[in-house]
Structure formats: structure tokens, C-alpha cells
Image (spheres, rainbow, N blue to C red):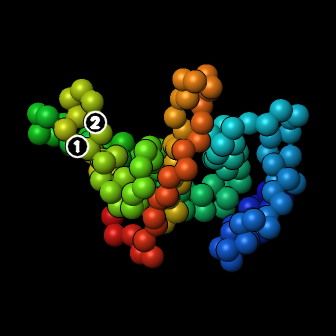
Amino acid sequence: VVLGLLRDLFAEMDMGLVGAIDAGELYRKLFQRAEEADVSEQMHRLFELCAHGPGPLKAVCHELFSGDLYERLQKGSVRRVPLDLCQLDLCVTEPAPLERLLEEHTRDVQGSIERRSYRLPPVLWINLDRFAYDREAQRGRKRQVRLTFPEVLNA
């Protein structure tokens, strides 16, 4: 049942009818609780269900969403980290093309990591962080900044 709902949901999205999708039934099946989960919690719950689901669903999700993170270390070696769900969290502070944000993301490293790169899956999950803390209002406020997506992404 969930696989059929996912198929229908992705089919609707592929046709460009994002605004017309009513994912309420899918949401209730996945989360089964009164309070709403944030997008990150929803995504993790969805992929947790897929990872423990029937073999065909698990295999399809793995094929569509898994990738690898490669971290080039300062000592010259490369560490490979398999990702069941390859997701990138990009911070959008000003109008920019997606390619520039991806380049900045690969350079944003800490500690002994010199640079990182990815083997991307056919379907890449991107979380866009466009929130900034408004000191005057004492709360987070969504920034209205444009992110341009290319017709074809060569990453």
C-alpha cells in the first residue's frame, strides 16, 4: 500500500503538479500521530520504513537514493562513507545558482578533512536552509532568496 502511494506521489510530482498533491493519506500512514513532524523527521521516518520494508521496496529505495561521501583527509588518504540516503543540507543566504551552493558545500569542512565529494544517486534529496534568526522579532524568519536550478546538473 505504501509503495503504491509513493508511486502515485512521485508520479504527481514528476508531472509538475506539486501544488495539487494531497499527501494527507500518505502522511497518516507513515506517521500515525496527531502532532506534525518537521520535514527532516518526516524524511527519516519514511526512509526508516523503506529500509525495513519488503525486499523490492528496500532495493528500489537503495537504488534511487543511496550514494557515497568521499572525504579527502589532510594526510592524503580518502575515506568513503556509504549513505543509504544521500541528502545535502544547503544554506541559502543570497540569490545563487545551485551549482555554486554545491561547490561551497563540498568546501565546507572541519578538522582533518580537506575536501569532500559525493557519488550522487539518481534522486538527490536537498534540504534548503533559508532561515535566519531575527533578533528584533526573537524568532526564525524565512529568507526570500532565489535559488536557480539548472535544466541539467553536471556535478
Depicted 19 relative to depicted 58: above or below: below
Q: Which residue is mark 2?
A: 109
Quarter assignment of residue 60: bottom right
Which residue is rendered at x = 52% and y = 63% of the image? 123
51 sits to left or right of 76: right
Q: Residue at x 69, y 38 (%)?
A: 38
Q: Position of residue 17 (x, y in %)?
A: 73, 72
- The answer to whether residue 114 is left or right of residue 101 is left
| Gap in angstroms between the C-alphas marked 2 and 1 | 6 Å
Q: Earlier in the sequence, mark 2 or mark 1?
A: 2
Residue 81 picture location, percent across and down: 36, 42
Mark number for residue 138?
A: none
Residue 115's tag is 1
Q: Residue at x 69, y 46 (%)?
A: 46
Identify the image quadrant of the N terminus: bottom right
Mark 2 is surrounded, within 10 Å at the Cα level, by few (under 14), some (14 to 19) or many (20 or more) other residues, namely: few
Res 84 visible: no
